[in-house]
Image (spheres, helix red, strand yellow):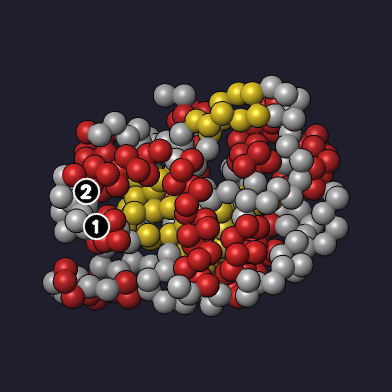
Amino acid sequence: MKKLDLIMNALFTPYRERVPDVEKIVSNMLSRGIISDEKEIENDHVAFRTMGVPNLGIASFEKIFLHYGYTKMDAYFFATKKLDAFWYAPPSPEYPRIFISELRLQDLSHKSQELIHHFTHKITADPVDAMDLDNASEVGTFFHRPLWNLPTLEQYETLAAESEYAAWVIYNRYYLNHYTISVHQLEQYNTLEKFNAFLEEIGIVLNTSGGKIKVSPDGLLRQSSSVAKMISAEFACGSSQEIPGSYVEFAERLPLPQHAHLETYQLTRKHRREGFEAGNADKIFESTFREQTQK
């Protein structure tokens, strides 16, 4: 098995255990004949959340994937959510795109900045630089290795009051935020209208921020997502509370206008809408926000 495959497995295995919707969706896709084997599911992209502090953030985290042949692509800015992001194209089509976002710490209140620095100030060197990036096992472990202490419930709630994104990262750290099923690759249910209907039939709750289907201005990138499942979180103060964990996304990439004449079987990744859309992603972020998780 290739090293990049090992790294992806190290990411996906605990994510799948933590997000029961994954198993629920896949098992129902199999039982209904939507797929005959789980390997038929194409992972459009995976996403990570980081914080823009010294020695962390995108500048640190991206080194892992650049080392494995990913190419840094477009930048995105989310003013309301105080985030920056980039997406990364894979070295070959069998691998998912990567989407990495970063909290713009300088845009938060002084109180929130101080609280985050309380956790991260002891990280005086980039932890990725200390790794052997050719050691897939070491890299896989890194995604789940705590780089700072757990917050108390009060600290978590203080951050959540200003930025639910910041609260998610301070507790979940580099945990895989979501993976994405490429709906357009399915033989049946190959539109989000069809696939969302299937999801709701089996009891999957969808993110309704911006509508259940978020559509790019050109109409060629369409996205939906489940609402994050609540997980039992143990805080540093000894308290426990359910908080949002991770979720599943669903993407439909339509053919570019110059390739619209092609038959479905002729279409490959290069023929379809590439990249991401800030307007869509802005609403997808809210899959972990209380307005969605408390529905």
CB-based contact (under 8 Å), mark 1 and mark 2:
yes
What crowding class fits label 1: few (fewer than 14 Cα within 10 Å), some (14-19), or many (20 or more)?
few
- Quick check: 150 above or below 191? above
Mark 1 or mark 2, earlier in chain: 2
Give residue 125's position: percent from left, percent from top.
Answer: 82, 62
Look at label 1 and name its amino acid. Answer: Asp
CA gap between label 1 and label 2 equals 7 Å
Q: Mark on residue 30?
A: 2
Horizontal placement of 200 versus 149: left or right? left
Horizontal placement of 197 versus 287: left or right? left
Q: Mark on residue 37?
A: 1
Give residue 81's position: percent from left, percent from top.
Answer: 59, 43
Depth order, front residue of 175/101: 175
Secondary structure, mark 2, is: helix
Q: Quadrant of residue 75?
A: bottom right
What crowding class fits label 2: few (fewer than 14 Cα within 10 Å), some (14-19), or many (20 or more)?
few
**Which residue is painted at 48% across and 74% down in the image?**
2
Q: Mark on residue 105?
A: none
**Which residue is painted at 24% across and 57% down in the image?**
37
Give residue 46's position: percent from left, percent from top.
Answer: 47, 57
